[in-house]
């Protein structure tokens, strides 16, 4: 009985704390996206015929761990072959955070070209304990 009580306490506290942290992170992401909205991150390889003064590789990398609640829900959904909606918010946060970190590294750039994202699941077998996302691109500084 004691084990069940501990499990329930961990489960509920994980859900509440994880939800609170996720909401705070999304609010921070939205604020930073608004600040960096003027810096385009594009998948195209070149822009108009402006003389390029400098180009450099910029990257952003993030690892986001899932809370205990998300791990259990992902395991259940995976067992029944359902959509892993709890993992979708982790992936969304990770992708957006990686792009923001890449943009923050490109301060003063006019654009970031050839942006690529790469992701990796962290965990064993079907259990998702976290995700890693890396964004990279070429920061372009036009000659003024």
Image: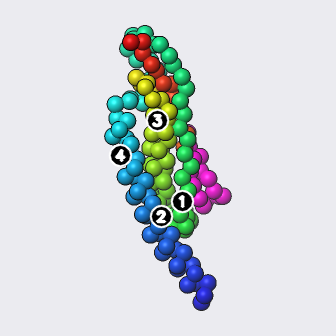
Residue 47: in magenta span: no
Distance between mark 1 and mark 2 Cα atoms: 8 Å
Viewer-nearest residue: 65 or 78: 65
Disc 1, SS: loop
Q: Residue at (47%, 13%) from the top-left corner?
A: 53
Query: Mark 3 sits on what residue?
Result: 104
Q: Earlier in the sequence, mark 4 or mark 1?
A: 4
Q: Earlier in the sequence, mark 1 or mark 3?
A: 1
Distance between mark 4 and mark 1 Cα atoms: 22 Å
Measuring from the top left, give residue 60's x and y in whole percent.
53, 38
Q: Is residue 10 visible?
A: yes
Q: Residue at (51%, 25%) from the top-left corner?
A: 138
Q: Is residue 3 left or right of residue 115?
A: right
Distance between mark 3 and mark 4 Cα atoms: 13 Å
Query: Mark 2 sits on what residue?
Result: 18
Q: Residue 115, labelled with which disc?
A: none
Query: Mark 3 against mark 2, which lies toward the viewer?
Result: 3
Structural crowding at the residue carrying mark 4, measured as other residues with C-alpha within 10 Å and reported as few (<14), some (14–19) or many (≥20)? few
21 over 43 or under it: above or below? below
Structural crowding at the residue carrying mark 1, measured as other residues with C-alpha within 10 Å and reported as few (<14), some (14–19) or many (≥20)? many
Q: Earlier in the sequence, mark 3 or mark 4?
A: 4
Measuring from the top left, give residue 122's x and y in whole percent.
62, 53
Viewer-nearest residue: 50 or 118: 50
Q: Residue at (55%, 41%) from the top-left corner?
A: 61
Q: Is residue 117 visible?
A: no
Pointers 3 and 4 in contact (C-beta within 8 Å): no
Query: Mark 1 against mark 2, which lies toward the viewer?
Result: 2
Q: Residue at (39%, 58%) from the top-left corner?
A: 23
Residue range in magenta is 118-132
Query: Mark 4 sits on what residue?
Result: 31
Query: Mark 1 sits on what residue?
Result: 66
């Amino acid at each position: 009985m004691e084990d069940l009580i501990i499990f329930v306490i961990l489960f509920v506290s994980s859900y509440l704390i994880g939800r609170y942290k996720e909401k705070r992170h999304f609010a921070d992401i939205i604020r930073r996206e608004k600040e960096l909205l003027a810096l385009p991150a594009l998948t195209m390889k070149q822009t108009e015929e402006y003389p390029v003064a400098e180009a450099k590789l910029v990257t952003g990398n993030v690892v986001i761990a899932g809370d205990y609640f998300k791990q259990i829900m992902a395991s259940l959904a995976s067992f029944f072959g359902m959509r892993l909606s709890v993992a979708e918010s982790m992936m969304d946060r990770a992708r957006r955070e990686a792009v923001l970190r890449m943009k923050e590294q490109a301060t003063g750039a006019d654009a970031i070209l050839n942006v690529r994202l790469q992701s990796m699941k962290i965990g064993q077998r079907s259990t998702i304990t976290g995700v890693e996302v890396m964004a990279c691109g070429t920061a372009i500084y036009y000659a003024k």
